[in-house]
């Protein structure tokens, strides 16, 4: 319920390639290349551009979102990092050209419409880089980067799977066996120990994996070293708590929903 949320406080799944690529295909079909025209909708779409801004400027995603939420434009954020906006726009246009070429090859659009889409998208990107996105970005910033940032349901699921996989590898038990023991009131620590495993070694392994991912995030400009240190320290505490936590009712619900009764062959 914690692993991935500690790793990334940035945008996550919204990437420039996906957002701008999809927008380009829409444009090639004759619609607005960057989607709806109201300011909030455009701001949400523009979040996909932040990935490219991070790549080109070295800023953290939360730094970019924070600055945008304060009313600065993308042009101002990029200039503050000593980079020209055109460099970022060129990168986005290159991604878009690649996606449109794929769409042409797959017969989704014609070459003529793709060429028109590239022109329209380039024009719209210039507009987006000059806009005040604060209204659309503020809630995203608070949800993803604020002091009370909460992991999404998907992030929680990824975290649970990471821990369950580690416990399974340490004990040799499958997920249903582990969850069944948790439903009966056992802790993860007790389950691991009873199967001859080493709880601390398991936690150390998870922390080591997280440390590697954090190092990648730092190198990619998604977080700072200070943020990584805080995440790592918090992860150690949370994993320790998780090993001794009582998952009784939650585990029982999962067990009833996912684990077939013995002898059913399901």
Image: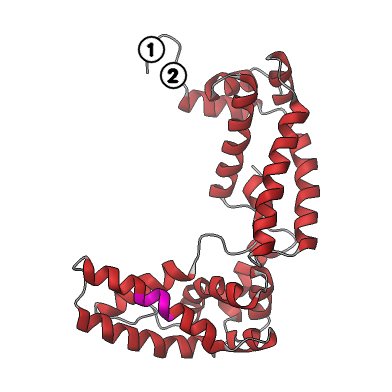
Q: Is residue 244 visible?
A: no
Range drawn in magenta: 93-97
Which residue is rendered at x = 41% and y = 83% of the image?
37
Label 2 sits on residue: 260
For this rendering, which residue is in front, 36 or 104?
Answer: 104
As displayed, is residue 248 above or below residue 122?
above
Residue 132: horizontal and vertical position, in percent?
58, 86
Which residue is rendered at x = 29% and y = 73% of the image?
101
Left or right of residue 18, residue 132 in this image: right
Residue 180: horizontal and vertical position, in percent?
58, 19
Examine the image and state in which quarter residue 59 appears.
bottom right
Residue 83: horizontal and vertical position, in percent?
63, 86
As displayed, is residue 167 above or below residue 66?
above
- Give neighbour class at mark 2: few <14, some 14-19, many 20+ (Cα, 10 Å): few
Q: Is residue 176 visible?
A: yes
Q: Secondary structure at mark 2?
A: loop
Left or right of residue 238, residue 25 in this image: left
Examine the image and state in which quarter residue 55 appears.
bottom right
Q: Quadrant of the N terminus?
A: top right
Determine which of the numbered discs, if any, sits on residue 43 in the image. Answer: none
Label 1 sits on residue: 264
Q: Secondary structure at mark 1?
A: loop
Q: Quadrant of the C terminus?
A: top left
Residue 260: horizontal and vertical position, in percent?
44, 19
- Give neighbour class at mark 1: few <14, some 14-19, many 20+ (Cα, 10 Å): few
Would residue 95 be counted in the magenta stretch? yes
| Marks 2 and 1 in Cβ contact (< 8 Å) | yes
As displayed, is residue 248 above or below residue 120?
above
Which residue is rendered at x = 65% and y = 89% of the image?
79
* Magenta stretch: helix, strand or loop mostly: helix
As displayed, is residue 246 above or below residue 34?
above
């Amino acid at each position: 319920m914690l692993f991935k949320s500690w790793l990334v406080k940035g945008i996550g799944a919204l990437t420039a390639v996906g957002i701008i690529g999809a927008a380009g295909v829409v444009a090639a079909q004759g619609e607005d290349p960057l989607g709806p025209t109201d300011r909030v909708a455009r701001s949400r779409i523009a979040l996909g551009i932040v990935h490219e801004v991070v790549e080109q400027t070295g800023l953290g995603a939360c730094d970019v979102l924070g600055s945008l939420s304060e009313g600065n434009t993308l042009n101002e954020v990029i200039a503050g990092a000593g980079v020209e906006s055109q460099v970022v726009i060129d990168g986005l246009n290159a991604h878009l050209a690649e996606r449109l070429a794929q769409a042409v090859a797959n017969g989704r659009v014609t070459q003529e419409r793709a060429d028109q889409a590239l022109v329209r998208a380039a024009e719209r990107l210039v507009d987006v880089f000059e806009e005040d996105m604060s209204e659309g970005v503020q809630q995203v910033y608070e949800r993803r980067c604020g002091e009370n940032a909460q992991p999404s349901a998907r992030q929680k699921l990824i975290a649970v799977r990471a821990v369950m996989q580690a416990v399974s590898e340490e004990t040799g038990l499958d997920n249903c066996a582990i969850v069944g023991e948790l439903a009966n009131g056992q802790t993860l620590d007790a389950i691991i120990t009873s199967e001859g495993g080493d709880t601390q070694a398991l936690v150390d392994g998870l922390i080591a994996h997280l440390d590697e991912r954090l190092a990648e995030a730092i190198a990619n400009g998604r977080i700072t070293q200070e943020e990584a240190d805080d995440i790592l320290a918090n992860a150690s505490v949370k994993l320790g708590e998780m090993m001794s936590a009582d998952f009784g009712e939650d585990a029982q619900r999962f067990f009833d929903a996912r684990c077939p009764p013995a002898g059913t062959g399901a």
